[in-house]
Amino acid sequence: MQLVVARIGRAHGIKGEVTVEVRTDEPELRLGPGAVLATEPAATGPLTVETGRVHSGR
């Protein structure tokens, strides 16, 4: 079973960062550095989280 924990949005800045719409109650556990995430469509992933930070309360 797969569970949606985030939605990747648009690019942010010039360093390869993206915005993420978090859909989980514990993002620091599920989306922390090293987390491997499946994607839909599967051909675009999996993705590995390198770093994360809160920006403007999001």
Image (cartoon, rainbow, N blue to C red):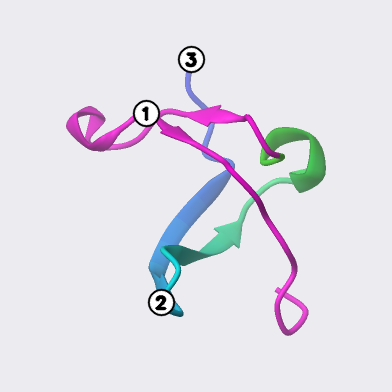
Q: Position of residue 19 (x, y in %)?
A: 51, 68
Callout 2 amino acid: Ile
**Residue holding disc 1:** 46
Type of amino acid at the residue the image marks with label 1 = Pro
SS of the residue under disc 2: loop
Query: With 6 as the anchor, is 28 left or right in this view?
Result: right
Mark 3: few/some/many CA within 10 Å (<14, 14-19, 20+): few
In space, the residues marked 1 and 3 are separated at their CA atoms by: 16 Å
Q: Is residue 33 left or right of residue 28?
A: left
Residue drawn 56% across the image and 40% down it: 49
Name the spot of residue 50 as percent of width and height, x first.
Answer: 59, 43
The residue at which mark 3 appears reads as 1
* Extent of the magenta region: 33-58
The residue wearing badge 2 is: 14
Quarter-of-image position of residue 30: top right
In terms of sequence position, does the residue under pointer 1 or pointer 2 come before the other?
2
Q: Is residue 22 above or below residue 56?
A: above
Badge 3 marks a residue whose secondary structure is: loop
**Mark 1 vs 2: CB contact within 8 A:** no
State yes or no: residue 34 in magenta.
yes
Q: In this rendering, which labeled residue sits more in front, label 1 or label 3?
A: 1
Q: Amino acid at mark 3?
A: Met
The single residue placed furthest to the front in the displayed view is 15
Vertical position of residue 56 compared to residue 19: above or below: below
Q: Earlier in the sequence, mark 1 or mark 3?
A: 3
Mark 1 in CB contact with mark 3 (< 8 angstroms): no
**How many numbered marks, from 0 up?**
3
Report how far apart the C-alphas of labels 3 and 2 lie in the structure: 35 Å
Camera-near label (1 vs 2) is 2
Q: Residue at point 80% right, 44% down?
A: 28
